[in-house]
Amino acid sequence: KNTVLEMNNLKTYFYTDKGVIPAVDDVSIKVKKGQIIGIVGESGCGKSMTSLSIMQLISPPGKIADGEILFEGRNLVGLSKAQMRSIRGNQISMIFQEPMTSLNPVYTVGKQVAETLLLHDSSISKQEAKEKVIEMFKQVGIPEAEKRYSVFPHQLSGGLRQRVMIAMALICKSKLLIADEPTTALDVTIEAQILKVMKKLQEEVDTSIILITHNLGIVAEMCDYVYVMYAGKVMEQADVYELFDNPKHPYTEGLLKSIPRANVDQNKAKGLYSIDGMVPNLLHLPQGCRFHPRCEYADATCRVLEPELVDTGNGHMVRCLKYKNERG
Ligand code: SF4
Ligand code: MG
């Protein structure tokens, strides 16, 4: 069994007094051992809700309404907080753009990361743990790592605290790492450094990674396989080369066209899209294909018929009524 995570037909809905919001709408994702998969799309497309669903961090009025999330064959849906806690760490770890868990203000940052490590690897000594933490601090771009080991969280800038959180997530060498816009808030140099550490983890200990980002440059560099999400649904999924060479969904085409040019200031241009129109309000989804208001190929059929995700061969799937006949 080579599959680490298998999400089948997941529905994460929010039951608000204005109506039901289908934040994740029948999404299936598979992650193999050592594979880096990307989930891309504009903000509000359901990428983060997908990752929070895996971690069982959806809170009311949100709820996993249907589907399963198998981690090494075990369904995570419905597990208690305590059960999930035992899976976090060396099984699944996560990095969020806005940390869900914050650092404890009364302990030094080095000690906190060392303790996380010791908790998951009882075979190492405290001194070894300290050395490993300092090494990891260096790898994620924390300057003067030895000195930073002994400071308290409030003595660090937001960017450095984020790097401490990243170090904490990476140091356990978990089987699955979920990284949701892990580097978006960071400088491009640091970003590159952190992506490198992630790649190294994947190469050295076969960690599987789910990388959620709106930056297609990062996807091209890091991922093996990509899911493109729009308004809660997967619109297209394919091997990374196939997706970039031969995008079949108009939304993917739009995303690819809007990759910032290399000569633009990378920090400024980071992930800025310019597809006309906006992600629809999930409370009032357009009829038919939910992308039709923004699609230049839309016709009358697209306005009434909702496309299915269709397998076009070689693991390339697309949800569009016209990808074949008219558009090749
Ligand atoms: Fe565009 Fe129609 Fe395809 Fe939707 S189904 S993406 S509206 S062509
Ligand atoms: Mg998000």
Image: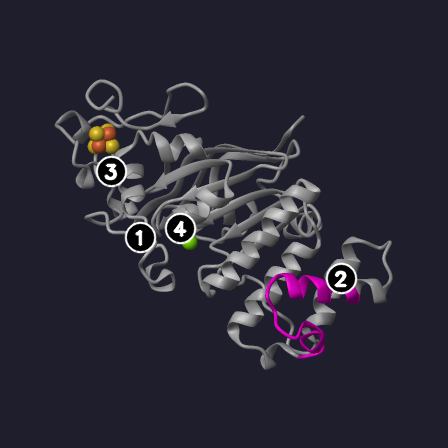
Q: Which residue is mark 3?
A: 291
The one of 95 and 304 positioned closer to us in this rendering: 95
Q: Counting other residues with Cα less than 10 Å from the Cα at mark 1, is it few (<14), some (14-19), or many (20 or more)?
A: few
Q: Is residue 221 left or right of residue 33?
A: left
Task: Residue under label 4, please give it.
Answer: 215
Q: Which residue is mark 2?
A: 132
Tell whether label 3 touches label 4 (CB within 8 Å). Answer: no
Quarter of the C terminus within the rendering: top left
- Compare marks 2 and 4 and give the one earlier in the sequence: 2
For badge 3, the amino acid type reads Phe
Q: Give the mark nearest the N terminus, 4 or 1.
A: 4
Say left or right for 22 vs 207. Answer: left
**Label annotation for residue 53:** none
> At numbered mark 4, what does the secondary structure look like: helix, strand or loop?
loop
The quarter of the image holding the N terminus is top right
Q: Nearer the viewer, residue 311 or 256?
A: 256
Q: Are marks 2 and 4 in contact (CB under 8 Å)?
A: no
Residue 313 image point, x, y percent: 41, 18
State left or right for residue 131 relative to residue 190: right
Q: Amino acid at mark 4?
A: Asn
- Pair 2/3: label in front: 2
Whether residue 136 appears in magenta in the rendering, the answer is yes
Vertical position of residue 296 compared to residue 198: above or below: above
Residue on which the image places disc 1: 261
State whether label 1 is within 8 Å of ligand 2: no
| Region of the chain picked out in magenta, as a range | 130-151
